[in-house]
Image (cartoon, helix red, strand yellow):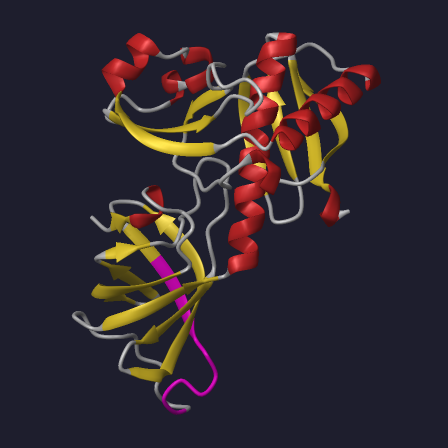
Amino acid sequence: MTEQLYLDDDTVLRFEATVERALDERIVLDRTHFYPTGGGQPHDTGRFRIADDPDRRWRVVDVEKADTIYHTVEPVDGNGGADDLSLPEPGTVVVGEIDADRRSAHARYHTAQHLLSAVLLDAYDAPTTGNQLYTDHAHLDAAYDRFDAEDLDRIEGRLNDLVDDDRPVSSYTMDRAAAEETLDTDRTRIDLLPDSITELRIVEVGGAESEPDEEPYDRTACAGTHVGSTGEIGEVVVTGRETKGSDEERIRFVLADHL
């Protein structure tokens, strides 16, 4: 199984790894910082190059997690010659470079989604039922009858208060049984995870700096990428809502610099 380095440090954008398998258009590495599609967050993109032959390069166009992590690649023009479309052999050391803009957008939207989930639970007792992030917008589904325009203004205001607080965002691993016993499962949403997952990665949004004794604002079981503090998200604009079925609402939002 590929070592998932992004779980320990999601700020790394360049790394070295060794090819374990090359299958059709896919590469399996011993370790990776590329995030695979999952949890409502799209995959990273970027490039690979041979460590000792930088002219041999491939674009990373998809990353999927199954029994291991598969990087789908396509050759870059001029990749060692027009006729050389072969993938790197097992044992080859490659350098991975992650698209920084795409990673940053996903991290900002994912952290904003955590804040939105917490706000909806606090203010409306509305648990999150699903979410989807993109590079320029996102939406979240919640178990609630109907939000009106005044609700959306209130939600947007609270989100931006939390952004302005510049609260720290961190992650750590925790035994599932201990998490279920000590953490608020409505917030961590542990019940949504398969029983086979016995160790959790908890993403925590800290308390306000002005109130050092305050408990963390939110703790959620999550394997995605996030910013280091809520201030890095930037202004959040709630752009609308729609009914998604009986007692379920969708809230759409965008970062102000993507309008």
Q: Position of residue 183 (x, y in %)?
A: 37, 12
Q: Which of the 4 image quadrants contains residue 172?
A: top left
- Name the residue furthest right: 149
Left or right relative to 178: residue 131? right
Residue 197, placed above or below residue 183: below
**In-front residue for pair 254/211:** 211
Q: Identify the residue shown where x is 59% and y is 42%.
A: 232
- Residues drawn in magenta: 71-81
- Name the residue furthest left: 91
Residue 80: say if magenta: yes
- Total numbered labels placed on residues in the image: 0
Q: Which of the 4 image quadrants contains residue 17?
A: bottom left
Residue 200, placed above or below residue 53: above
Q: Identify the residue shown where x is 61% and y is 49%.
A: 135
Q: Position of residue 121 (x, y in %)?
A: 58, 13
Q: Identify the residue shown where x is 83% and y is 19%.
A: 149
